[in-house]
Image (cartoon, grey):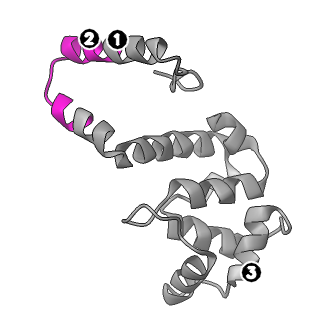
Amino acid sequence: MAEDIARGPLATKVNHLFTAVRQAGGDEYTFDEVAEAIRAQGGPTISATYLWQLRKGLRDNPTKRHLEAIAGFFGVPPAYFFDDEAADRINAELALLSALRDAPVRNIALRARGLSAKSLEAISDMVDRVRELEGLPDPLADTDR
């Protein structure tokens, strides 16, 4: 999955940033919010409509400055758009951040902090077994463990 996003067209990467990087309350940023924040940070002029067109694949040749500004807003390096290996790493980090937004997942992670490697391995095995029992796919199947 992460590789599909990393190697996909520009629209897939822009869309992934909008869906993965959220406001503090969990809502997606609007095109207007992103465009205004880029302008407020001294970035290039960019409209909400242009962002929408990039996200939908109607435009696919933005300037380097536009990509740098979009990357900066979403807190990823510009390499996300230019380097497939960097995009793979960044997508893995975004997936982790997304999982940690889920309060019960975050609670388990915080409670596991400080446990020995052996204990963490046992917990990991238990989670894998419960996922299997519930018929859920391995979320790490496409990444290195």
Which contiguous range is marked in magenta?
109-125
Residue 121 magenta-highlighted: yes
Give the image location of residue 47, x and y in percent: 69, 84
Residue at the extreme front of the image, as rendered: 134
Q: Tell me where residue 61 appears, x and y as whole percent.
A: 83, 67
Secondary element at image label 1: helix
Q: In this view, does 99 lie above or below 74?
A: above
Residue underneath mark 2:
122
Q: Is mark 3 on a helix, strand or loop?
A: helix
Kind of residue indicated by mark 1: Asp
The image position of residue 115, as x and y in percent, is: 15, 23
The residue wearing badge 1 is 125
Label placed on residue 3: none
Q: In screen coordinates, is 20 left or right of 1?
A: left
Confirm or deny contact between disc 3 and disc 2 (CB under 8 A): no
- Report the quarter where the N terminus lies: top right
The residue wearing badge 3 is 49
Tell whether label 2 touches label 1 (CB within 8 Å).
yes
Query: x, y (%) of residue 111?
Result: 17, 33
How packed is label 3: few (under 14 Cα within 10 Å), some, or many (20 or more)?
Answer: few
Looking at the image, residue 38 lies above or below residue 110: below
Does residue 121 show up?
A: yes
Mark toward the start of the polypeptide (3 vs 2) = 3
